[in-house]
Amino acid sequence: MKRAPVNKIIPFSNVDGPGNRTSIFFQGCPFNCLFCHNPETIHLCVDCGACVAACPAGALTMGESRAVWDSAACVQCDTCIKVCPNGASPKVRDMTVEEVLREVKRSAPYIDGVTTSGGECTLYMDFLIDLFTGVKALGKTCLIDSNGSFDFQADPRVLAVCDGVMLDVKAVEPAWSRTLIGRGPELVLKNLHYLLEAGRLQEVRTVIFPGLDAENEETVRHVARVIGDACDYKIIRYRPYGVRAAYRARLGEFETDADYAEGFAALARELGAGKAYVV
């Protein structure tokens, strides 16, 4: 029976793809982005117990070998996340495909489909394929929100059950990519071309950082020339909320100015990405 760590499930979302969708966030990510606004989703809990004593609501206890979270007692103060020395969360459910589908079915009459995100949901691709097969049986669409760390071309099963991929292209220059996310851009860019050619590129997203003119421009120019009018291109303003303190100091304590970001959206449109806009 396949299982995967689920950070949270949002029954109704209108920002994770077209229409009203159920969004499923998985725990774990192979990137370590400086600007990550939910870094508690990067690592898996190692059950060290540091969060148990700190929980003011008594919602965490230490079992025989793991931290146990009582969702009914939890007041969502996030103290456990703040004190975690491993950048993780104890509020993760180890769920089966059937358990996730059960939650999807509760919302099924009111949604257009399901979007899987994270962390990075493609870490659990076998799980996703079974989940999407079940969602398709409900007559709903399936989208993947991905950082591009999975080689989509290597597994033909994926696009058979996935209606589209919402792809992050964070950087295209190798040195800047390694600084920003801890990896080079090669696989992400390979996925960009492959998903575009396969007709499964739902949207592309690039975060714009204040003051980093050359880095921002190089990424936007590359993406715009590749995608053209094939899909939406979201130019996302950097926002420091949730970003780790050491990285806020490096990237900026203030969010990217709207007019500054709009300049890159205008550049993208000039280069043929007619569906570029700022969020």
Image (spheres, rainbow, N blue to C red):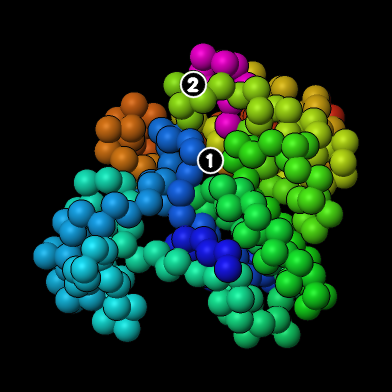
Q: Quadrant of residue 222 in the image?
A: top right
Asked if the magenta segment contains residue 133, the reply would be no
Residue shown at 61% from the left, 76% from the top: 98
**Mark seen at residue 21:** none
Viewed as shown, does residue 215 lie left or right of 270? left
Instruction: Give 271 or 80, whichever is nearer the viewer.
Output: 80
User: Of the residues tagged 2 and 1, which is closer to the observer?
Assistant: 2
- Residue 161 locus on image (x, y percent): 80, 58
Residue shown at 33% from the left, 32% from the top: 247
Asked if the magenta segment contains residue 174, the reply would be yes
- Residue 233 locus on image (x, y percent): 72, 41
Which residue is disc 1 drawn over? Answer: 237
User: Mark 2, residues whose alpha carbon is within 10 Å: few (<14), some, or many (≥20)?
Assistant: some
Determine the secondary structure under disc 2: helix
Amino acid type at mark 2: Arg
Determine the secondary structure under disc 1: strand
Instruction: Give 121 or 177, whichever is nearer the viewer.
Output: 121
Q: Quadrant of residue 230 in the image?
A: top right
Task: Report the Cα–Cα distance between label 2 and label 1.
Answer: 20 Å
